[in-house]
Amino acid sequence: MISTEKILNTVEMVQKDNLDVRTVTMGINLMDCRDTDIDVLCRKVVNKIEKHAGNLVETCEQMVAKYGIPIVNKRLAVSPAADVASGFDVAGFVKLAKALNQAARSVGIDIVGGYTAQVQKGTSRGDATLLEALPEAIHSTEKVCASINLASSRAGINMEVVGQIGRILKTMAENSRENDGFDCAKLVVFANQPEDNPFMAGAYLGHGEPDTVINVGVSGPGGVKRALERRIERDGAENLGLDDLAEEIKRTSCRVTRCGELIGREVARLLGTQFGVVDLSLAPTPKVGDSIGEILTCLGLDAIGAPGSTACIAMLNDAVKKGGAFASQAVGGLSGAFIPVCEDSALADAATKGDLTLEKLEAMTCVCSVGLDMIAIPGDTPAETISAIIADEMAIGMINKKTTAVRLIPVPGKKAGDRIEFGGLFGGGTVMPVHNPGKSARFIRFGGRIPAPIHSLNN
């Protein structure tokens, strides 16, 4: 029996604390659309997406009306494009991207993920062609997002592709110079990429997933912040320990997870498909009051990035996972705390002040979900330096058996301290300085692979 108090707490989280379902993401397997004719393949892709996702937006709107919980985004995640279009040339891969974009517009969803390649141990012909097609594919579409898995704890790091990604990002930034390199915001690179992640830009449908599935991403940084503020106001900071605050985070995360699973299972039932996972990731927005950074200030940090920031984010991440695991057996995806600088007003402000540096962010990614996310850097940062930053983050994921990712935006014509604005959920902020640019080129030029750690032999 759910108590009246818990119901009222959840209602208050919706009304006052920015609680929402951040995304309902339908996964669709496109492998049966393969054909020797690229035009036929693309037609099959559009038809299958329209068949299965045609009612997704309408169904989500019904849930909003029924339960009063906003659903911010409706998205698609599809089979890796490197597999679906394998055997075609660059023009064929670009056609597939445009077909995905057409299908996304047809069914009214916000974003489609799955322009993806898995290259952690090597690069197939299809993977190589997708990488070559990436800049044109992303620039010629509005709704397509791309992701590349560069490393895993079992395979090591593919340094050949790590080096290539730096050059690709420079090209993508230049292609979208008039929008401050925004094309780069639609590409994320991973170590240990999960197959059921509903969040963009890293969502895709893995090979072990059902033919169609509904995965839900919920987010409640505003609710967590307000819960902490209420607890501190009620009991007094002098009477509380960090374990008490961790327990408050855990309880709030539990309520948020249950809301997300309720919505997800109902959407799946109405669409006649399977329910997959609820991803409880505290994903912030640029809105004040909906920030991971503001949670850190509630936990006693006067400056985000000050000593103690890594410990705070570790505690937050752990409590979120424990609350979600208690609430549901179907927790998956990333499920933790995101720290995307441009998408979080408090983090962006800390970066502007110089309190939060790229190096401190890297340290924080060792203990939280994802990694160096939505970070604007100077446009003249060398490609090899960008690749080296990526390599560092891939190493963290590989060694620690966790998912890490990088989404860097080298902003053409901008230098450290300049302002950029992307708008919407992508937010904006200050271009962050990159120290020691050009000092990693010889390392990156070696290429090859960084072998997997010894614990990869666990079996």
Image (tube, rainbow, N blue to C red):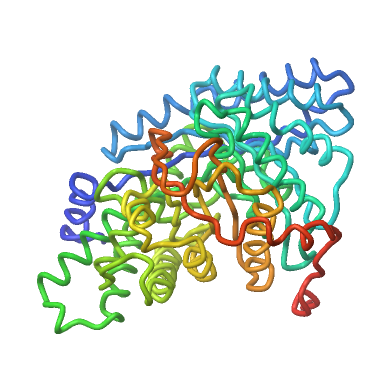
Residue under the image location 47 percent in, 49 percent down: 416
**Measured along the vertical axis of the image, is residue 330 above or below residue 323?**
above
Q: Residue at x 77, y 63 (%)?
A: 443
Quadrant hosting residue 454: bottom right
Q: Nearer the viewer, residue 145 or 131?
A: 131
Q: Is residue 412 above or below residue 89?
A: below
Instruction: Say which quadrant the N terminus sits in.
Output: bottom left
Q: Residue 130, image x and y in percent?
A: 78, 35
Please state the horizontal and vertical placement of residue 171, each as a whole percent of the image.
Answer: 68, 35
x, y percent for residue 384: 71, 52
The residue at the point 65 percent across, 64 percent down is: 392
* Quadrant hosting residue 307: bottom left
Decide if residue 428 is on the left or right side of residue 69: right
* In the rendered image, the vertical position of residue 207 relative to residue 151, given as above or below: above
- Residue 194 locus on image (x, y percent): 63, 54
In the image, taking residue 225 as reference, residue 159 lies left or right, namely: right
